[in-house]
Amino acid sequence: MSTRGRPCAPVEVPDRLYFKIGEVAKLVGVKPYVLRYWETEFSILRPGKTRARHRLYRRKDVETLLEIRRLLYAERYTIEGAKRRLRESGRLADEEQAVQDEDAATLARVREELLELHRMLADDPAPPPLTIGPPK
């Protein structure tokens, strides 16, 4: 079945850990700007980013995007309707919880590192003075 010129047949997702936005766009059958827009609308879509700020999608993200495309293009849901459908299927709630858990774990690690730095500074509050130029 084809809607708006986009194939809605099942897509074989390659067995890889990460995908670039162009690769995902080809797999899903939409332009990259559509993927970026969907990221703003669907909170479960949070691709990782490289140091150069390029998006890296996980396999689970690609599968979610394929489901979103099916809901929007084949079943003709609105964005809000697709969000509701994903939420009802449990996918949205589970992935949002996973993102929150991951964020909480990251914050806990950062907090521990900050506490360790604080302890180190408390043990040696006055570091030796910096000398600039030749030693005296």
Image: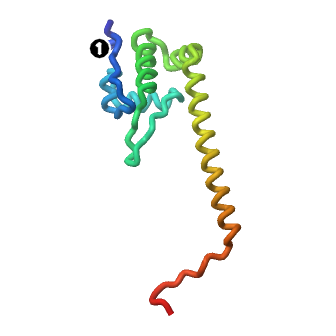
Residue visible at 32% across and 21% down in the picture: 29
Residue at x 54% of width, y 17% of height? 86
Q: Is residue 113 above or below residue 26?
A: below
Please tell me whether mark 1 sits on a helix, a strand or a loop: loop
> Vertically, is 85 above or below 15?
above
| As drawn, 123 above or below 33 | below
Farthest residue, direction top: 1
Residue 109 placed where, x, y %?
61, 47
Relative placement, left or right, of 83 versus 23 is right
**Position of residue 127 measured from the top left corner of the image (x, y, whole percent):** 62, 76
**Residue pushed farthest bottom?**
136
How many numbered discs sit on the rendered protein? 1
- What residue is shown at x 61% (from left), y 34% (from top)? 101
- Quadrant into which the N terminus falls: top left
The picture places residue 102, in percent across and down from the top left corner, at 58, 36
**Residue 10 versus residue 128: which sits nearer the camera?**
128
Q: Quadrant of residue 73?
A: top left
On the rendered structure, is 90 left or right of 52?
Answer: right
Q: Quadrant of residue 94?
A: top right
Q: Residues within 10 Å of mark 1 (few under 14, many from 20)?
A: few
The answer to which quarter of the image holds residue 98 is top right
Colouring rule applied to residues? rainbow
Q: Residue at x 44, y 11 (%)?
A: 76
Query: Which is nearer the eye, 123 or 98?
Result: 123
Instruction: Pinpoint residue 35: horizontal percent, then vertical percent.
Output: 40, 29
Residue at label 1?
5
Instruction: Please state if 25 lies on the left or on the right of 67 as rendered.
Output: left
Q: Amino acid at mark 1?
A: Gly
